[in-house]
Amino acid sequence: MSDSSLTFSHDQADAHDRITEMLRGAGIDLDDALLTPPRDGKDSVMAVVGKAGSGKTLLLAALYRALADAGVDVVSGDYEGRRRKDRRTLAILAPTNKAASVLRMRGVPATTIHRILYTPVYDPEYEKIAEWLAGQGERPEIEDLTDQALDRAHAFYQTNKSIPGALAAAGLRGSDFITGWKRREEALDVGFVDEASMLDDKQFEDLKEIFPTLLLFGDPAQLAPVNQSGSMVFDALPAPTKLELHRVHRQDADNPILDLAHSLADPDVDFHAFEQLIETAAARDERVVMAQRVEVDLMARSPVLVWRNATRIRLINAFRAVHGAPETELLEGEPLICDGIELPLKHRKKRLDLEARGLIKGAQTIYLGPGRKPGFSRLHVIGAEDPQVSAASIVKIERPDEEEPFIPFAARMGATFLHGAAVTIHKAQGSQWPDVQVFAPDLYAASRMGRTEAGQPLWKRLAYVAITRAETRLHWVVRNRLSKPTGPLRINDLRVAPAPLELEAEI
């Protein structure tokens, strides 16, 4: 293998060699930077599995750079440009906006699975700008755009490599240059999928149709997708194609949060012993906090992670109450979670518009205020490349001991939202936040129930997923208490898009 072995552990180096061999069989020779036509009928799937800190992301990033250096085109889902007969392609995918944004912050141009399954259709006039930015055409002359606007688009693209973002920087709205979305008709070559433990069987089959060479990166200790019988898509892969990383990478070796996560594999560690480990870690390292209450200020950007739905609803209502939120409206800065799209089949195009902009189920958003039309909301989609949109919304506020949620306002149809100040640990998979609060009484309740999943106590799987969502600091909350806010909710910390996109879901 290449000199990247200097930074790899033994198992990472072995995985790199095995993947390099798989790619060579697909016509991509990383050692000699040589591309040859793909071999018809030769499909391959391989998985890299390992617990948090084992170096999966480091390996993914190294492989991406090697493929790019070899001349493979990276497809982002924004714009693909003209096809060439000799072109070889790579797409790097994640199940959620937040998971994709984690990779992008590390220099890996990731996008969501949905953005690869469906491709944008550009207006021919504005497609000339996209071709120019992508290096496939001359600088265009557009009647409605000044030279200064094109300069802004070019400057944005040099930094962000996002065609929609660059066009927005020129003063265009999404509805100006994207006329619709279509299901991808032609296959790509190579797909990397991060957070593959979240994939369900349907998504896996869709991806195999698009990518003859598919590489999955996943954590077998996480929670399996709902309705998957406790299994993950890579569990059934034969041993030669499932590469396991065991060693914690040296950059993460002194991380107390990862130490706690890995301690859960010890069968002698019960819930009481685990809390003692947390208390010991908190005494010596500020990255672990044995918290006596939920900090309400953190809930506006990183939800409290819980197991029980009833706990989630109680915390949401406590968050709204302590901020003085009225029942009939939302406050600017309240967090929301997209719960899907409520549109009839005849409005399939509108559904694709909403989902392609990042409003997929589970997307974390921040309410910025009402839109221009009744029932519309201006939203900041956390982790999306072009984060600020306006969409027809149906907002549901669940309340304790009531079967039906309260709906402060609603469009006739559009994107549906639940409150996002607290979420279940299942829904938190694929996301990370600098500070994460885990509501320990819920995990204690899970431990008392004695349930197992895939041979592991359920509370341990829940705890593992919950604490590994923390990038910087883990707050292990041991009491059912809520702090008072230090100030009102705010939105001035959110990145402002050049031009909010109006996503009208009503015809």
Image (cartoon, helix red, strand yellow):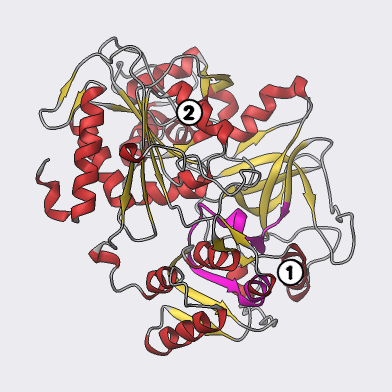
The magenta stretch is 418-446
Q: Which residue is mark 2?
A: 207
Asked if the stretch drawn in magenta spans residue 423, the answer is yes
Q: Which residue is mark 1?
A: 311
The residue drawn where x is 62% and y is 51% is: 365
Above or below, comparing residue 133 to residue 18 in the picture: above
Q: The N terminus lies in which quarter of the figure?
A: top left
**Furthest-top residue in this view:** 85
Describe the element under mark 2 as helix, strand or loop.
Answer: helix
> Mark 2 is on which residue type?
Leu
Describe the element under mark 1 as helix, strand or loop.
Answer: helix
Above or below, comparing residue 304 to residue 287 in the picture: above
The residue nearer to you, when weighing 180 against 271, is 271
Compared across the picture, whether 81 is left or right of 356 comes to left
- Give the spatial CA distance, label 1 vs label 2: 36 Å
Asked if the stretch drawn in magenta spans residue 339, the answer is no
Quadrant hosting residue 336: bottom right
The residue nearer to you, when weighing 474 against 239, is 239
The residue nearer to you, when weighing 309 against 143, is 309
Above or below, comparing residue 351 to residue 219 in the picture: above
